[in-house]
């Protein structure tokens, strides 16, 4: 009888200890999540080698690539977005643009609507609130330039919204 009592006591103590353990684990998890949110932008591979810039200067070619895919800018600062199309001017020249998307925008959904927005030069009105800045369509040999400011630090995507281009024409902007 005494032995059973001890046994139950031991089990209870063990369970209590486990309970305590899981509380600590939860605390650890939430601390880790908070840290992840904090270092979100710092965890972008290669970002430590990218200097702060006041200009996002992109060149696009007929192979549907931008010459750069990673930028670092300061929040609240006026930034120039410039796109130059260095593609061939012969035949049927290919156009490109650059669209900077707000944090958390689903690129695939955006591109889907962009594809259906030919009359709006592939800038979908349905996603107006997700667009921070965009250039005009730029044909080979031309360039376009716009200014923008991003107030909130974080990680932002940019793409070319021409149909079928965004898969290879995209990059990231870290705002600190
Ligand atoms: Cu393009």
Image: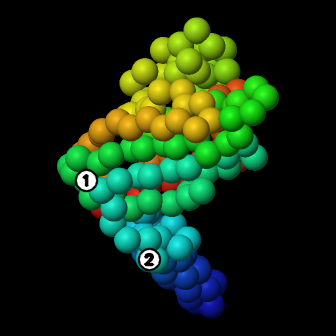
x 58%, y 9%: residue: 119
Instruction: Locate residue 69: give its quadrant.
Output: bottom right
x, y percent for residue 116: 66, 14
Left or right position of 134 against 1: left
Circle 1 sits in a helix, a strand or a loop, which is it? loop
x 30%, y 56%: residue: 54
x, y percent for residue 16: 48, 76
Cα separation between marks 1 and 2: 17 Å
Specify the quadrant that holds the C terminus.
Answer: bottom left
Q: Examine the rendered structure and indicate whether residue 123 appears above or below residue 81.
A: above
Whether the residues at callouts 1 and 2 have beta carbons within 8 Å, the answer is no
Q: Which residue is mark 1?
A: 75
Q: How many marks?
A: 2
Asked whether the viewer can see residue 167, the reply is no
The answer to which of marks 1 and 2 sits earlier in the sequence is 2
x, y percent for residue 13: 50, 82
Q: Which residue is mark 2?
A: 48
Q: Examine the rendered structure and indicate whether residue 129 appears above or below residue 46.
A: above
Instruction: Locate residue 153: give its quadrant.
Output: bottom left
x 37%, y 71%: residue: 51
Instruction: Locate residue 134: give its quadrant.
Output: top left
Q: Examine the rendered structure and indicate whether residue 82 appears above or below residue 72.
A: above
Between residue 81 and residue 31, name the one nearer to us: 81
């Amino acid at each position: 009888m005494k032995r059973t009592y001890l046994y139950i006591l031991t089990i209870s103590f063990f369970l209590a200890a486990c309970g305590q353990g899981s509380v600590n684990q939860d605390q650890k998890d939430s601390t880790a999540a908070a840290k992840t949110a904090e270092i979100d932008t710092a965890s972008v591979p290669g970002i430590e080698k990218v200097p702060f810039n006041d200009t996002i200067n992109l060149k696009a070619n007929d192979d549907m690539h931008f010459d750069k895919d990673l930028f670092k800018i300061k929040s609240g600062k006026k930034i120039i977005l410039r796109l130059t199309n260095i593609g061939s001017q012969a035949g049927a020249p290919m156009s490109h643009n650059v669209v900077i998307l707000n944090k958390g925008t689903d690129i695939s959904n955006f591109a889907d609507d962009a594809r259906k927005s030919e009359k709006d030069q592939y800038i979908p009105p349905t996603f107006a609130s997700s667009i921070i800045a965009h250039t005009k369509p730029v044909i080979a040999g031309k360039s376009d330039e716009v200014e923008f400011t991003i107030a909130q630090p974080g990680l932002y995507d940019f793409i070319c919204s021409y149909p079928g281009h965004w898969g290879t024409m995209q990059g990231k902007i870290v705002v600190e």
